[in-house]
Amino acid sequence: MTEWGLYVHIPFCQARCTYCDFNTVTGMGEAEHRRYTDALIREWAGEMLPSGPLVSIFFGGGTPSLIDPHLLGRVIDRVDARVGGISAAVEVTVETNPGTVTPEKLAILKEVGVNRLSIGAQARQNHHLLSLNRIHDVSAIDETVAMARDVGFRNINLDAIYGLPGQTLIEWQETVEGLLRLAPQHLSLYALMVEAGTPLKQQLDRGQAVLPQEDAVADMADWAETRLGAAGLLPYEISNYAIPGLESRHNRLYWQLEPYLALGAGAHAYVSPRRWWNVRGVRRYMELIEGGADPGDGEEELTLAEEMREYAWLGLRQRRGIDRAAFRARFAIDPVVAFGSLVESLGGQGLLEWNESRLWLTARGRDVASVTARALVDAPIEGLPAPSVPNS
Ligand code: SF4
């Protein structure tokens, strides 16, 4: 039976970080939080549930930890009631920002069934946190983790970003070492992405901020991988490290192209072969639901070739690569046959390797992962039509 997950988008933030282009709003208070979670519950009541067991609920944002944890508890209760009981094995994650929680709030999250926290640390230098417009300082990161442990959370992820404007390798090493001292079970280390329309992009365009050189950023990634390996946190995807056995189930749903439903403004859901998404505007989303209308803003049906390409790309982002038997079971063709000429070509360039059971990116392949992704998007597939939309 196919396992599936649920993403719940909580769009509220206290302030907007300079690099962020997520679907978030600031300045909404408790009444709007309540109204929004009522809308989530109404949306949930109308969802068609995939067959098979629910294995993950992920409250992402935004800053889910900003709102009253009882509101998240209400959503969890409704999910529990409709799926016939959330088992203890279901991963229930809440994205949490330092500066938005107290021991009481964390205890309530635990009580309502949350068993994993994903804490946005981002950096361990106050000047970087300040220039990113984060709402917390370094000491708040440590306090949040300490409070979470005190109330009994045993599965904690910490997020950090490298390649920040003006960041040196030594600062990055300090960040990673500082996070390791907090003994997380999981680390997500993201290379900074500069998104159009963000304050960060404007600062860079005006010369008010300068990014480190590409080589320096690659050195940060390489150093972190070696250091984390020595600490027992193994890479299982390009940006994600975990103590073996504590990899994020929710991440795996996405990367293995497994089904997930999604609630909330701008949230995207996928149940093969269909992907659909809600309107982005938070007020619009609430108004539509309150008026009894569908909050959907669009949908697409992936072709078999699109699913194969997406599955292959997401598979290659994972350290263990693509499981050839799983690919054959899903698509009735072996990936080495399906992507024959591309596999040969990437293999010839030293970017890809394979054996009888798997295909995976080499270290060089991971360094130029975007090139590999691009090649897969354009790749012909044995026995199927070529991509119909030319990519420019
Ligand atoms: S807290 Fe997270 S979601 Fe909110 S603005 Fe900052 S990066 Fe974006």
Image: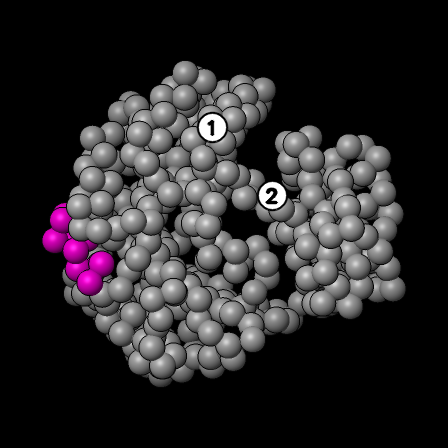
155 in relation to 177, above or below: below
Residue 1, quarter of the rendered image: bottom right
The amino acid type of the residue labelled 1 equals: Ala
Closer to the observer: label 1 or label 2? 1
Residue extent of the magenta highlight: 101-111
Q: In percent of the image, x 28 and y 60: which residue is there? A: 114
Q: In terms of depth relative to the viewer, which is nearer, 33 or 305?
A: 305
Q: Is residue 206 visible?
A: no
Q: In terms of depth relative to the viewer, which is nearer, 178 or 70?
A: 178
Labelled disc at residue 187: none
As helix, strand or loop, the secondary structure at mark 1 comes to: helix
**Majority secondary structure of magenta residues:** helix
N-term mark: 1 or 2: 1
Whether the residues at callouts 1 and 2 have beta carbons within 8 Å, the answer is: no
Label 2 beta carbon less than 8 Å to ligand 1: no
Instruction: Tell me the residue that label 1 is attached to.
Output: 230
Instruction: Tell me the residue that label 2 is attached to.
Output: 319
Pointer 1: residues within 10 angstroms few (<14), some, or many (20+)? few
Instruction: Name the side, left or right, on which 25 lies relative to 167.
Output: left
Q: In terms of depth relative to the viewer, which is nearer, 132 or 89?
A: 89
Q: Position of residue 26 (x, y in %)?
A: 26, 50
221 in relation to 195, above or below: above
Q: Is residue 108 magenta?
A: yes
Q: In percent of the image, x 70 and y 67: which residue is there? A: 330
